[in-house]
Amino acid sequence: MANRPVEVRPPAGSLGVLTPGLGAVATTFIGGVEAIRRGQATPIGSLTQMNTIRLGKRTEGRTPKIKEFVPLAELDQLVFGAWDPIPDDAYESAVKAGVLDARDLEPLAEFLHSIRPMPAAFDRHYVRRLDGPNVKAGKNKRELAEQLREDIRRFSEEKGCSRLVMIWCGSTEIYLEPGPAHQSPAAFEKAMDRNDASIAPSMLYAWAAIQEGVPFANGAPNLTVDIPALVELAKERGVPVAGKDFKTGQTLLKTILAPGLKARMLGLRGWFSTNILGNRDGEVLDDPYSFKTKEESKLGVLEYILQPDMYPDLYKDVYHKVRINYYPPRGDNKEGWDNLDIFGWLGYPMQIKIDFLCRDSILAAPIVLDQELFLDLAQRAGLRGIQEWLSFYFKSPMVAPGLYPEHDLFIQHWKLKNTLRWLGGEQPITHLGIEYYD
Ligand SMILES: NC(=O)c1ccc[n+]([C@@H]2O[C@H](COP(=O)([O-])OP(=O)(O)OC[C@H]3O[C@@H](n4cnc5c(N)ncnc54)[C@H](O)[C@@H]3O)[C@@H](O)[C@H]2O)c1
């Protein structure tokens, strides 16, 4: 087993939480944390706040809360900052997003008004359905990235932060494949200097964060930090990174159900998933270039879980389709329908239908909170580069070159908890349990 970090530094002082993007997810997260801090709400959906962790044997009865076992920052220590091309403050943005009801938002109005987005590094080429006046100007991408670094430093100083974390909660950018500019930190910097089209705005935030020693996670499916140049830089600078794409509604259910079907060796002929949603995210995803990025992220999941090469009788040629339709009347309250054509003993067909009336940002907010607290923990523990143990939260988990991503939610959950045990100096749990019967 790899050596455990010598020491985890304590979470003293304020933790600055920076989000590029102050839309539905970010404002639901920030408003939620404030409501919880005031004792007006419960942090449902958050492992860092609610989940316990079993230590040792089942007979030992040691199951502290995760937050009592590893040293995490307290909610009272969080201070918030954001960038967005749309100048609305967090209150105005939350009202437009329509996720939280007025009865929840009004008591938080003064606090949310105080969070105003800094001018964004934004380019319509990468998010075609959006525009806004609150943007930076610079002669090239390097200059914009340097301005982001100054923002980080200024924010940290003004708020008296002892540490920071950054999570991309911005829109889904157009589909990009890794290219020559993404291969090394030097190539990346030169590409910023010459305004190379393969450097998207989200990458500028990631680069700026890493340069400033700030852990970075990506909640959208864009490449962003998932390129060799930035992973290498993160390792060099001792910065943990994670991504991509929050695993919330339909994909969460897919990674709960598919491992179950496979565990029982039940076959699958097709899985048709369709979504209607009417928020700003839905509007952005209505653009085929942004949808392509999301589609790739959503499609990969089944292939890796079902392993058709190993089980051709069960999973060869599964027809997997994902559709997203922008349907304004629904707002953030998405509806996701799934039809699964499965088969069992002697090939007899069966069907499963799921109609998930979900609330995207309500599912995403606790994920943002957990990632921030865990990334900060990782940094204090001296972990650097890709944090695969946080795959639990992502649709397209980042992994080391040559590894396939683990999508099964239960394996991911187990990995996360074993990593916490390791960080806390406890033995990992294997569930072998043979000793109980000696
Ligand atoms: N809600 C979910 O369950 C969920 C799940 C997985 C992924 N995501 C992803 O999370 C992201 C945020 O989702 P949302 O529902 O809050 O969307 P949203 O449209 O409400 O908010 C995104 C915000 O990002 C801003 N933005 C765009 N480009 C930017 C830039 N370059 N710099 C700074 N800000 C920028 C937009 O102006 C917008 O206000 C999206 O990419 C979405 O695909 C959301």
Image (cartoon, rainbow, N blue to C red):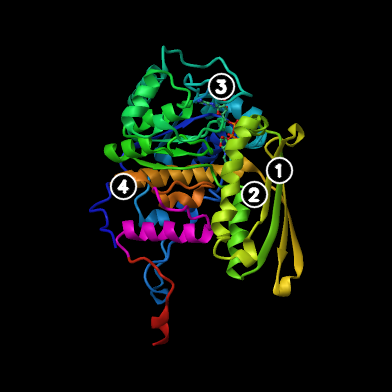
Which-is-in-front pick, marks 2 and 3?
Answer: 3
Q: Which residues are magenta?
A: 401-426
The image quarter containing residue 187 is: top left
Alpha carbon separation for disc pair 1 and 4: 37 Å
Three-letter code, disc 1:
Asn
**Is tag 1's residue or tag 4's residue first in the polypeptide sequence?**
1
Residue 15 locus on image (x, y percent): 37, 37
Residue position marked by numbered label 2 in the rendering = 250
**What whole-number distance in Å separates the C-alpha atoms at marks 4 and 3?**
35 Å
The residue lying toward the viewer, choosing from 376 and 269, is 269
State how far apart marks 2 and 4 are (Cα).
Answer: 31 Å
The answer to whether residue 67 is visible is: yes
Q: Amino acid at mark 3?
A: His
Give neighbour class at mark 2: few <14, some 14-19, many 20+ (Cα, 10 Å): many
Question: How far is the residue under mark 2 from the one under mark 3?
Answer: 28 Å
Residue at (53, 39) in percent of width and height? 221
- Mark 3 Cβ inside 8 Å of ligand 1: no
312 horizontally vs 149: left or right: right
Which image quarter: residue 437? bottom left
